[in-house]
Amino acid sequence: MEEIIPTLRKNISQFLNRDYKLFFVNSATFGLFSILFDSSINKIGIPDQGGFKGFIEMPNLLKKEYIEIPTDKGIIVPKFKKDFDVFLFTSLSGYISSNPSKLICQETKKIGIVSIEDISGTFPDKDFGWADIIYCSTGSPKILECGYGGFVGISTEINLKESEKVLSFSHLPKSYYEKLYTELENSNKKLNKLRDIAQIFYKSSLDIPYKDPKSLSIFVKHVAPNKSLERLNREIRPKMGKSLFTKCPRYDRIKESGFVIESIKLYGMGTEEIKEISEKIEELI
C-alpha cells in the first residue's frame, strides 16, 4: 500500500496541467463536500445548467449561498464579477459540450476567485483540468471505472487547510488502488473510443444540435420525449445500467426538451452493434 499510492499520484500527475496535492476519496461527492466545507468559502458560483447536480445540493447541505451564472446553452462564458469565492464547473457541460477550461481559470484567477473543475468526463485530455482544484469520479460508468471512489487535486498555490484535513479522513482498500492503476493505463484508449461512439450518432438523421468532438453524451432534440423514451427503453438495453437515455430538460445535462444518449453505457460494444442501435432509435422516434 505504501508503494502503490505514491506511484498512482505520480501516474495521475503526468496527465495534469498543474502541480496538485492529490487526495484519494471514497467518492467524488465526498471530495466536493470536503472542498466546500472550508470556512474560507462562503459564496459559490455555479453555471445555470450543465453542471454536476451536487453543485446545488452541496451548498444547501453546508448552508452556504450559491449563485447561478447564465451560460450560452450550457457553455460557460468566461466573464465574471467578484460575486463569489469559488466557481464550480465541469470540463464538459452536461457531458455534451466542451467548456473553455483554461480561459475560465485565467479569468477567475484575475479577480481572485478559486476555480474548481470536475474533470470526470475528460480525463486524461490535457485541454481540460486547468483549475485551482480538480476532482475526478472513478465510479460507474466513468472513464476511470473502479465502481466507486475518486481523487481531488488541490493546487500547491491554494491554502485550504480545513478541506485537506477532511480529505485525509478518507481511506480506501488496496484493491481500489490496484484497479485505478489499471484504469489509468487504459484511460486514453477508452476516452478516444467513447468519442468515436458519439461520432456514430452524429452521422445519423437524429436531431442533434450540439456535435462536440469531445462529448461523451449526445443530446437529441425532441418536443415530446416521454412517449418516445417509453418505447426506447422497452426496445434498447445498454451495455451497463438500466437505461441508455436521460430525459431532458435537467440541470446536469441541458435545459432543453429532448433526451440524452449516454454513449459511455455502450462502451465495449462493436461499431456495427452501435450503428444498429442508432438506426433503431431513428426508427422508434
Image (cartoon, grey):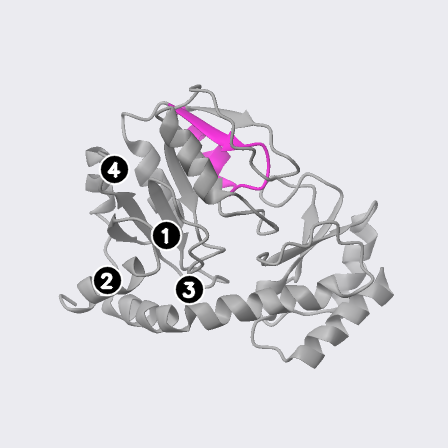
Compare marks 4 and 3 and give the one earlier in the sequence.
3
Residue type highlighted by circle 4: Ser
Mark 3 vs 2: CB contact within 8 A = no
Q: Earlier in the sequence, mark 2 or mark 1?
A: 2
- Packing grade of label 2 (10 A; few <14, some 14-19, many >=20) is few
Specify few, some or many for label 3: CA neighbours under 10 Å numbering under 14, 14-19, or 20 or more.
many
Instruction: Identify the residue under disc 2.
Output: 10
| Residue holding disc 1 | 27
Tell me what residue is drawn at x 75 percent, y 68 percent: 278
Which residue appears farthest toward the left when viewing the image?
2
Q: Quadrant of the N terminus?
A: bottom left
Task: Give the alpha-carbon distance from disc 4 to disc 3, as whole Å.
Answer: 24 Å
Q: From this viewpoint, is residue 62 visible?
A: no
The front one of 25 and 196 is: 196
Q: Residues within 10 Å of mark 4 (few under 14, many from 20)?
A: many
Q: What residue does disc 4 label?
A: 163
Q: Residues under labels 2 and 4: Cα distance?
A: 22 Å
Which picture quadrant has residue 234? bottom right
Circle 4 sits in a helix, a strand or a loop, which is it? Answer: helix
Under circle 2, the secondary element is helix
Q: Is residue 85 above or below residue 6?
A: above
Q: The magenta stretch spans which residues? A: 43-64
Q: Nearer the viewer, mark 1 or mark 3?
A: 3
Q: Is residue 219 left or right of residue 253?
A: right
